């Protein structure tokens, strides 16, 4: 599930960035990218929920371990599988996108102009807390 999530999300971001760079004002836009992320998570959690509980994010897996919902062995195996899936998903996008992957930063996020790195980190921590608490 993590492989597919990274593949779809990175490919969407790189596709949008490359399309809007070629022709400004075109592409799926920020809303389309957000929908790609949300819809992919929804489908993958639904499809894998019966097998692994829908674990895609290592932070969620770790939170469930801390909440005593997973054993240590299962937690480690899930996190290793999630990390390997993420590496393979990003590798697939890099192989398909080629030069666009390097030029556009691999689809990675960055802190917006005018926002400090500390504020960005705080927002990530708060958002991850809400995600883990919700699950």
Image: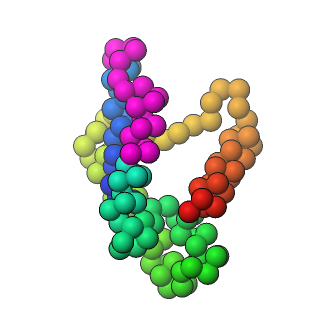
Quadrant housing the C terminus: bottom right
Placement of 74 over or under 4, stated as above or below: below
- Dominant secondary-structure state across the stretch colored magenta: helix
In the rendered image, residue 113, in percent from the top left (x then y), is placed at 65, 26
Q: Residue furthest top?
A: 24
Q: Is 26 inside the magenta-drawn segment?
A: yes
- The residue sitting at the left extreme is 96
Image quadrant in which the N terminus is located: bottom left
| Count of marks, rendered view | 0
Task: Please check the rendered image and state whether residue 43 is part of the magenta-colored stretch, yes or no.
Answer: no
Residue 17 seen in the current view: no
The answer to which of 129 and 122 lies nearer the viewer is 129
**Part of the protein shown in magenta:** 22-39
Q: How are the residues colored? A: rainbow
Residue 55 in view in this figure: yes
Place of residue 92 in the rendered image (x, y in percent of width and height, measured from the top left): 29, 51
Residue ID at (44%, 62%): 56
Is residue 112 positioned above or below 83 on the image?
Answer: above
**Residue at screen point 62% across, 30% down:** 112
Q: Quadrant of residue 71?
A: bottom right
Identify the residue at image location x=60%, y=59%.
134
Residue at image location 43% in from the left, 70% down from the top:
53
């Amino acid at each position: 599930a993590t492989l597919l999530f990274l593949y779809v999300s990175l490919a969407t971001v790189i596709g949008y960035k490359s399309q809007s760079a070629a022709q400004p004002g075109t592409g799926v836009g920020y809303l389309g990218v957000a929908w790609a992320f949300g819809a992919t998570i929804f489908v993958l959690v639904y499809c894998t929920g019966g097998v692994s509980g829908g674990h895609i994010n290592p932070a969620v897996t770790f939170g469930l371990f801390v909440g005593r919902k997973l054993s240590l062995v299962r937690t480690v195996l899930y996190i290793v599988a999630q990390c390997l899936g993420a590496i393979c998903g990003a590798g697939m996008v890099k192989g398909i996108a080629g030069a666009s992957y390097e030029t556009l930063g691999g689809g990675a996020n960055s802190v917006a102009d005018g926002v400090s790195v500390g504020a960005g980190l705080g927002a990530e921590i708060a958002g991850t807390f809400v995600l883990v608490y919700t699950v």
